[in-house]
Amino acid sequence: MSPGGTITGTSFLPGAPTASSSSCPPPSFEEHEEEPEVIKEWRARRDAQRAHRDETSTEKKAETIKEAQQAIDDFYDNYNDKKEKNIAQTRREAEEFLNSRDDTTAGGTSWERIAKLVDLSGKGMKGGATGTGKERFRELLLSLRKDENAPGATGY
């Protein structure tokens, strides 16, 4: 090993020329030499293609941003419409509930008011087939509602 850090022409220092790179220097043009015409044309085509790609990319980006903004606007329009419809629906249901509540507390006998609150159709969540306790309860309420002399029929 020589004092410069090379072994038989190979250097271990970074950036130092090696045996293979020192024999073939890269081609370079001196300041007074011009590039060949082929390279000039290639650079011009490359620059034109880059400019075209950049322009296309910018247009696509602008279009994507425009579409995204439109999608966001549509989403919020739809959201606000649904929100307003739900608010209106809730108000209608609240008014209907209050009106029906007032109807059940006014007029008629106690059994008539109770019959308005209870589902007597038998088609509720758990029905009430013939012979069940619910069927008998419905029959009892219907008979009490029709009977003017039933206990509690006079009012509160």
Image (spheres, rainbow, N blue to C red):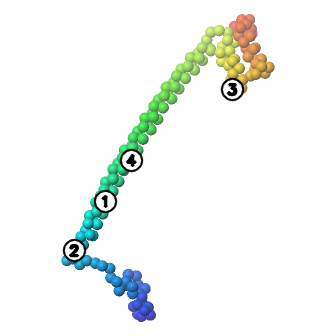
Residue tagged 1:
49
The numbered mark, 1 or 4, whose residue comes first in the sequence reads 1
The numbered mark, 3 or 1, whose residue comes first in the sequence reads 1
Q: Of circles 1 and 4, which is in front?
A: 1
Q: Quadrant of residue 101?
A: top right
Residue 109 visible in rendering: yes
Q: Amino acid at mark 3?
A: Met
Residue at the top extreme, as displayed: 149
Q: Of circles 3 and 1, which is in front?
A: 1
Estimate the x, y position of residue 55 in percent, counting from the top left.
31, 54
Quarter of the image with the C terminus is top right
Contact, mark 2 vs mark 3 (Cβ under 8 Å): no
Front one among 114 and 6: 6
Residue tagged 4:
64
Secondary element type, mark 2:
loop
Residue tagged 3:
125
The numbered mark, 4 or 2, whose residue comes first in the sequence reads 2
Relative height, residue 84 to residue 146 (above, below): below
Residue tagged 2:
34
Q: Of circles 2 and 3, which is in front?
A: 2
Q: Quadrant of residue 100?
A: top right
